[in-house]
Image: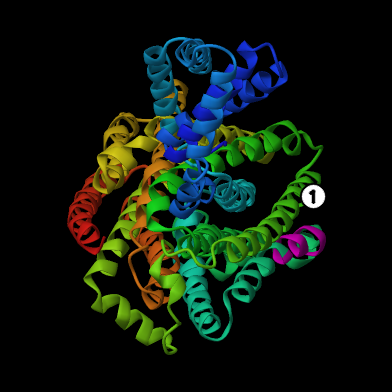
Amino acid sequence: LTSPCPSDVFIARKILLFSSSIFLMKQYSLFLHVFCIIQVILQFEIVLCSQNRIPNSFIPRRDQCRSTNSSLKALDKSSNMVARRKGSPSDDKDKANIVVDSLETTARGGSSDGKKTSANTLSKIRNIIFPIYGQKEVVKFLLIGTIKFFIIMALTLTRDTKDTLVVTQCGAEAIAFLKIYGVLPAATAFIALYSKMASIMEKRSLFYTTCIPFFLFFIIFDLAIFPNIGILHPSLESVQKIFGGATTGVSLILAKIISNWTSALFYIVSEIYSSVSVGLLFWQFANDVVSISQAKRFYPLFAQMSGLAPVLAGQYVVRYTSKAPDFSTSLHRLTGAITFAGIMICLFYKFASDFVQANERDNTDMPASSKKKTKAKMSMMESVKFLASSKYLRLVAALVLGYGLSINFTEIMWKSLVKKRYPNPLEYQAFMGNFSSAVGLSTFFVILFGAPVIRILGWRVGAIATPSIMALLAAPFFICIMMGLDNPTTLSMAVILGTVQSLLSKTSKYAFFDPTTQMAYIPLDEESKVKGKAAIDVLGSRLGKSGGSLIQQGLIFVFGNIINAAPVVTAIFYTVLFFWISSTNQLSKLFQAQN
């Protein structure tokens, strides 16, 4: 009876007619109460069905609908027989029809027009806020989204820790050197190892083998390395002697990096994790199990859900870890939260994999890559050649390179100003914690109101939003720096403008850049996803940031520090954004053709 099938609806009304006749004869009134409830449920499900809210498994097949028609004539005869026993058939049927009409009006809420308007309004609101339908879709979304939530939580905690260690010990300028001489070689070695593992390991083993070693390193650093830095670190004076006793410029920066090499190592591992965790661990799994039709609805909401992770992680840093009596105790508290996030990542990956395997084994709408066998093995050089031979992948790489270059130009300059404003490590840590919370909160609201941008306005508008926002907000920041920073008020203003620029740049990245970039991989085959995606997300991202660092190193040699080179950095920054937007327009055409 509780079915949207037209035949069932007609039969249900016949049953109500029959029960109403019995009620009019003052017999078996309980039947009417039972069928009133059935009618309310029936009307509710008809509304849901009209809005496509009932999963396909709930909708009866045609043969089931036809099988119920056989009882139609019997119900007609039964109704007429009861009517003939007690007076005029027409009188009883008229009374019964009045009861049925009354029940239908009550079930519809009195006014069908008002009900439809209200239902349409609620449906539109729900489509904007949470356009995911059916129990299976909701469970699938929550399981996969929780993986990203804890990945971003761990990423936020490690990012705040690495920045606090390096910026306060070595200076923000050291970041440019670490990305060239530390992160880039490490990323190259990692991608070679990952490509090899991807060819010989199945996906679950590959996920765990890639994920777990990072969290083991963070635990070892906290328990064994950092407590012994007095033994492990050479003195700054002894390292300066190697560089000829230099006290300024590049030599001093390199001397600080070497004398704090464990902090530099933590920075390198954290940078690799930031690319691997989101680019490979999460998005590769999501692209394998989320269909193209689901991606436009799921991907923006993934960013919205994970946007709450920096809020939680940032406030954990501000209200708990930064209140520690010393940085060593603060590091213990940070590592505990990082370890918890790592355990949750592995657990929810297992839950999500098991759910998808059990419930979507025969889903024909899944990405084509999940149904294809992995092709022959490729060496690292072959993987690079494969990337270079594909125009589609080259354009995706151009987007990743564009973001890496542009964010690096503003980020190092901004962190250098923050260090001048907050020289104490715990104060710097608290500031970065508040900044992370602000990033997460702004990301959540931007996606809440901006998620329809990708779904309604299309991939191109969503992809072009990030470089446009960065171009608009960087102008006042650069202008403030070029006005001079000798005045404390000007320094505070530059820190504020840089914070806003960096905040909204990262927010637009999580809200628009990440979903649109990852959607671009969905039409590709398995080989392009695994090998080409790994090269772009890890090696390409690192080349972008390392390339920006290399340029800034040259500027430091010429101008003495990055602040004095602000006019040149501004010109390079807007040149990169121009080519980024141009590549986005070209990729948009290919993406539409692929779909």
**Regarding mark 1 in the picture, which secondary structure is present there?**
helix
**Does residue 535 lie above or below 442 as drawn?**
below
Residue occupying the point 45% across, 67% down: 538
Prevailing SS of the magenta stretch = helix
Looking at the image, which is closer to me, 318 or 566?
A: 318
Q: For residue 220: magenta?
A: yes
**Does residue 260 lie above or below 528 as drawn?**
above
Looking at the image, which is closer to me, 137 or 211?
A: 137
Q: For residue 512: magenta?
A: no
- Residue 16: horizontal and vertical position, in percent? 56, 24
In what quadrant of the picture does the N terminus appear? top right
Looking at the image, which is closer to me, 547 or 392?
A: 392
Task: Answer with left or right where residue 198 lies relative to residue 588.
Answer: right
Q: In the rendered image, which residue does mark 1 sit on?
A: 332
Instruction: Magenta stretch: give its range.
Output: 216-224
In what quadrant of the picture does the C terminus appear? bottom left
Please state which amino acid type lies under the numbered disc 1: His
- Residue 367: horizontal and vertical position, in percent? 41, 65
- Residue 296: horizontal and vertical position, in percent? 38, 48
